Amino acid sequence: MTVQIVPSVLTADFTRLGEECRALEEAGADRIQWDVMDGQFIPNITFGPDVIAACRRVCDVPFEVHLMCERPEELLPRYVEAGCEIVIVHPETLREPHYTYRTIRSLGAKLGIALSPATPLAFVEHVLDLTDLLLVMTVSPGFGGQAYIASMEPKITAARALIDESGYDIDLEVDGGIGPETIAGAAAAGADVFISGSALWKYPCYAEGVKDLRRRAEEAWRR
Ligand code: DX5
């Protein structure tokens, strides 16, 4: 396992998204996460595929898209076309999850499954063979800047055990309230991929933030 730091551009300067993506790439981000919201699944609206396709043209860092939308199966082909390598969906938004998971992979993208705080790990235990990334949300989906829900750490640990027992190569990603004070707990619980939005933007520069968060997660693993 290696620590991966994945900024969420939900907190970025929307007047300069392309430049922000380039700066995050130069700062050492392993991927960039696009939080896509449709105002239906949650009361917020963010990025369409054309915005992501435009930013795709100005940097090479891999993109992942976190679809917090109703009926994501209708939208996701356009996000793959826009250049998103990983498509993350919430099982509750899918009419037929196994079919949608196979569709994402048939489009050549990797499959991410996101579990909101109240969604049990059982939602993924029968589809680990299709899963490339398991996202344990440490906030309720919808907005950046929320407080980290530390009570999710036992769920992260159970997810780590499930993944290790499966033998599949699956990223265990956490998202929500990840910063210098919380990343160690998430890492110690078993996460290896860390989404950071508002906390990263509080550092003097992106490179310092990516480096500090990576160091803190690695130190937690060594303890
Ligand atoms: C919630 C979003 C946020 C975002 C990260 O729907 O998914 O968790 O990515 O925001 P911070 O790091 O500010 O919690």
Image (spheres, rainbow, N blue to C red):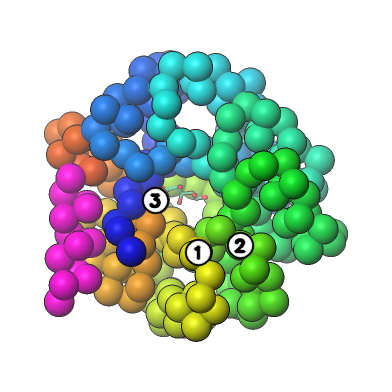
Which residue is under mark 3?
A: 195
Query: Does the magenta portion include 217?
Result: yes
Q: How many labels does the image show?
A: 3
Which residue is under mark 2?
A: 131
In-image side of 125 versus 134 (left or right): right
Q: What stretch is highlighted in magenta?
A: 211-223
Mark 2 surroundings within 10 Å by alpha-carbon count, few (fewer than 14), some (14 through 19), many (20 or more): many
Q: How far from the left and from the top, in percent, is residue 114?
A: 58, 60
Mark 2 to mark 3 CA distance (whole Å): 18 Å
Identify which amino acid the numbered label 2 is placed on: Thr
The structure residue drawn at horizontal position 35% and vertical position 73%, both measured from the top left corner, is: 190
**The N terminus appears in which quarter of the rendering?**
bottom left
Q: Which of marks 1 and 3 is nearer the N terminus?
A: 1
Figure quadrant of residue 53: top right
Q: Main secondary structure of the magenta part?
A: helix
Label 1 element class? loop
**The C terminus appears in which quarter of the rendering?**
bottom left
Q: Is residue 108 visible?
A: yes
Label 2 element class? loop
Q: Does the closest atom of ligand 1 sit within 8 Å of the Cβ of label 3?
A: yes
The structure residue drawn at horizontal position 47% and vertical position 41%, both measured from the top left corner, is: 33
In-image side of 115 versus 158 (left or right): right
14 is higher (above) or lower (below) than 148: above
